[in-house]
């Protein structure tokens, strides 16, 4: 594990459906976060990003069950399984302190009747009942000063803060216990570009100051990920299909799905003004009954006969991994982006 | 069906529109003396940060919120204070699609039920109504079999938003107002929703008012761009002018804050 902060192996998480059939939203996924780095997890809506985040944060609750998976982090080896029913109490000591989750829409979950400082005290006491109010507030004050944020925010109510400030505050509060790993799920999606930039700069400062030692940043917004992450993992239909250093992956996409996602990004450039992007045809598959072989093959412009027959295994090229039959046949070649445009 | 020729008279216009909200100790001016015109068959994007007054302007144009002062004209006629039948007729012509399609559906009803119910006031029934539903779903690339018998939760986010656009089109509107209609969608679904609106503009001459905080989307398909800050319009012009040769500092800052795929990598490396 040298240089690796967290490695989660063979994580499988299923939703128990009313029909009695389990729907595997995350299927045998292995993911790792190097020490001091930010890993971006990207993919379309419904590809399993959030479910994987919840499994790693050990907060899976019915109907979500983690049926397999092991996480090595900070000399701990944690069985992620929740088959004993609901989020496992064995996981409680790790939540918040070892792995902290900043869930989607967290900024809207601040109680409107509490000042921010009351929330700080509540969060700190939830982990250690002996924490005094003064200790909790001192810690929050120091943290805000360290990040050059206004301390007066502690005395305000949620409605007195802008969306961007609320999001930055919940991010600070979720890391007050200095977790080894922060999992931030769509932290920037509800923010405008200026607030997004402020949050990203704060997150980078937090990693630099070693408030946390690694981040998993979940979003479908690839430009944001390219700005903030060191590595990217692209998920499709419950599986990771490509992973590698951010710059390498953005400039040299090896999976047709990654290439199609990248083509759909609309930058304010002259190229965007003239191009007509097709988007990815069709919809993500029903995970209760996924396609055979490569799960992306029904939507893939490069699909070959073997794609529907056999699941591609990971091909490792330097620091870049991809699971695709086309990539197997075209070593080190970038997927041509032109197929995604009219 | 729709008048796509631009006779010079704007389809919809706001003239010196102001909106003030009463707050403790005074007034907050959300939209300040804004004048803007929408021409037939064009896409006009209104961009700005949260709190810049974009949605308030849209709500006033939709007549969902009264103006504090100013005038809204539709096809040259003052609609600022119309009521009753006149207002209902205005709402047929000016339709809206909002950010969260899930919030716009009743989860207990099928899509077909929701679409039919909306047309009850138009006294359309039976085969005529089914044909209309099929036509409008066709505009957004869906077949009745894809959606009509399904419940909202059985559709993907992109499909739900496309159904919302189809619902708006059933009224045969002349103006479609999309308030952050694509901001909850992922990049691929977003592109397909924008393509749908682009096709409607090109093929049906629909006028689109597209409100967004994402300049990249405006760049992709808007004909004109208006930039708002603190309730004021700070810059307006063709998309090329505003995005590639911005004049106002606020527009420049907004553009510089946009994380672009390749450019931002350089920032990260430095």
Image (cartoon, coloured by chain):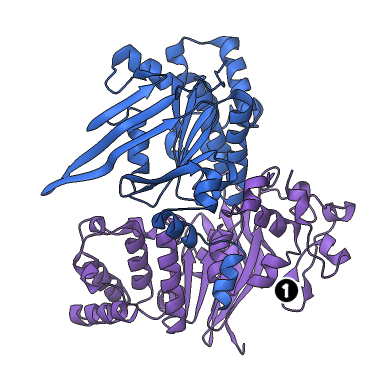
Chain colours: A purple, B blue
Residue A261 in view in this figure: yes
> Tag 1: Cα neighbours inside 10 Å, few (<14), some, or many (≥20)?
many
Helix, strand or loop at mark 1: strand
Residue B174 lies left or right of residue A4; in this view the side is left
Which sits in the foreground, A112 or A274?
A274
Q: Pinpoint the chain carrying mark 1.
A: A
Q: How many marks?
A: 1
Hey, which quadrant is residue B154 in on the image? top right
Q: Position of residue A115 (x, y in %)?
A: 20, 64
Q: Residue at x 45, y 58 (%)?
A: B252
- Return the residue at label 1: A320
Residue B266 lies left or right of residue A333; in this view the side is left
From this view, report whether residue A42 is shown above or below residue A69: above
Which sits in the foreground, B78 or A335?
B78
Which sits in the foreground, A266 or A318?
A266
From this view, report whether residue B22 is shown above or below residue A71: above
Quadrant (top left/top right/bottom left/bottom right) for the C terminus of chain A: top right
Q: Residue at x 20, y 46 (%)?
A: B28
Q: Residue furthest left?
A: B25
Q: Position of residue A90 (x, y in %)?
A: 45, 75
Q: Residue at x 58, y 38 (%)?
A: B159
Q: Residue furthest bottom?
A: A2
Residue A9 in view in this figure: no
Quadrant (top left/top right/bottom left/bottom right) for the N terminus of chain A: bottom right
Q: Position of residue B224 (x, y in %)?
A: 51, 39
Q: Position of residue B176 (x, y in %)?
A: 48, 29
Residue B268 lies left or right of residue A188; in this view the side is right
Q: Residue at x 48, y 53 (%)?
A: B246
From this view, report whether residue A260 is shown above or below residue B261: above
């Amino acid at each position: 594990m040298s240089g690796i902060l967290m490695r989660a192996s063979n994580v499988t998480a299923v939703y128990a459906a009313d029909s009695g059939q389990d729907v595997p939203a995350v299927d045998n996924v292995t993911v790792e976060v190097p020490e001091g780095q930010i890993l971006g997890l990207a993919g379309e809506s419904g590809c399993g990003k959030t479910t994987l985040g919840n499994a790693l944060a050990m907060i899976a609750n019915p109907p979500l069950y983690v049926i397999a998976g092991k996480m090595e982090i900070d000399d701990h080896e944690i069985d992620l399984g929740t088959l004993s029913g609901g989020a496992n109490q064995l996981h409680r000591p790790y939540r918040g302190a070892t792995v902290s989750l900043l869930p989607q829409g967290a900024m809207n979950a601040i109680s409107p009747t509490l000042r921010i400082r009351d929330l700080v005290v509540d969060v700190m006491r939830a982990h250690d009942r002996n924490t005094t109010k003064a200790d909790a507030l001192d810690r929050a004050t120091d943290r805000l000063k360290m990040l050059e944020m206004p301390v007066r925010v502690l005395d305000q109510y949620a409605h007195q803060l802008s969306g961007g400030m609320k999001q930055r505050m919940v991010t600070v509060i979720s890391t007050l216990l200095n977790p080894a790993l922060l999992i931030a799920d769509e932290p920037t999606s509800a923010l405008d570009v200026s607030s997004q930039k402020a949050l990203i700069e704060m997150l980078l400062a937090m990693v630099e100051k070693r408030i946390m030692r690694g981040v998993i940043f979940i979003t479908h917004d690839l430009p944001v990920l390219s700005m903030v992450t060191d590595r990217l993992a692209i998920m499709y239909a419950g599986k990771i299909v490509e992973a590698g250093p951010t710059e390498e992956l953005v400039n040299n996409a090896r999976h047709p799905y990654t290439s199609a996602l990248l083509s759909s990004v609309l930058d304010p450039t002259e190229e965007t003004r003239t191009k007509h992007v097709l988007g990815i045809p069709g919809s993500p598959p029903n995970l209760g009954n996924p396609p055979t072989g490569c799960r992306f093959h029904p939507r893939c412009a490069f699909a070959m006969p073997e794609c529907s027959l056999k699941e591609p295994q990971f091909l490792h090229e330097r620091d870049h991994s991809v699971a695709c039959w086309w990539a197997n046949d075209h070593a080190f070649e970038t997927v041509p982006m032109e197929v995604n445009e009219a | 069906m729709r008048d796509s020729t631009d006779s010079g008279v704007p389809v919809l216009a706001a003239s010196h529109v102001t909106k003030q909200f009463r707050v403790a100790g005074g007034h907050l001016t959300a939209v300040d003396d804004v004048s803007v015109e929408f021409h037939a068959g064009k896409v006009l994007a209104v961009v700005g940060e949260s709190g810049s007054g974009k949605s308030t302007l849209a709500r006033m144009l939709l007549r969902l919120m009264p103006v504090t002062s100013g005038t809204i004209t539709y096809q040259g006629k003052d609609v600022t204070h119309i009521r009753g039948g006149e207002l209902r007729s205005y709402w047929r012509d000016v339709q809206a699609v909002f950010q969260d399609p899930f919030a716009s559906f009743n989860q207990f009803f099928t899509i077909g039920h929701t679409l039919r119910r909306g047309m009850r006031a138009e006294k359309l029934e039976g085969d005529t109504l089914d044909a209309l539903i099929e036509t409008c779903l066709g505009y957004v690339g869906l077949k009745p079999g894809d959606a009509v018998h399904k419940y909202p939760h059985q559709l993907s986010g992109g499909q739900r938003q496309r159904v919302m656009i189809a619902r708006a089109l059933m009224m045969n509107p002349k103006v479609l107002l999309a308030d952050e209609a694509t901001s909850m969608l992922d990049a691929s679904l977003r592109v397909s929703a924008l393509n749908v609106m682009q096709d409607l503009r090109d093929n049906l001459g629909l006028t689109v008012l597209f409100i967004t905080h994402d300049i990249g989307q405006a760049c992709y398909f808007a004909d004109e761009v208006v930039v708002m800050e603190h309730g004021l319009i700070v810059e307006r012009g063709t998309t090329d002018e505003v995005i590639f040769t911005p004049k106002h500092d606020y527009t420049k800052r907004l553009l510089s804050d946009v994380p672009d795929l390749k450019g931002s990598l350089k920032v990260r490396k430095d």
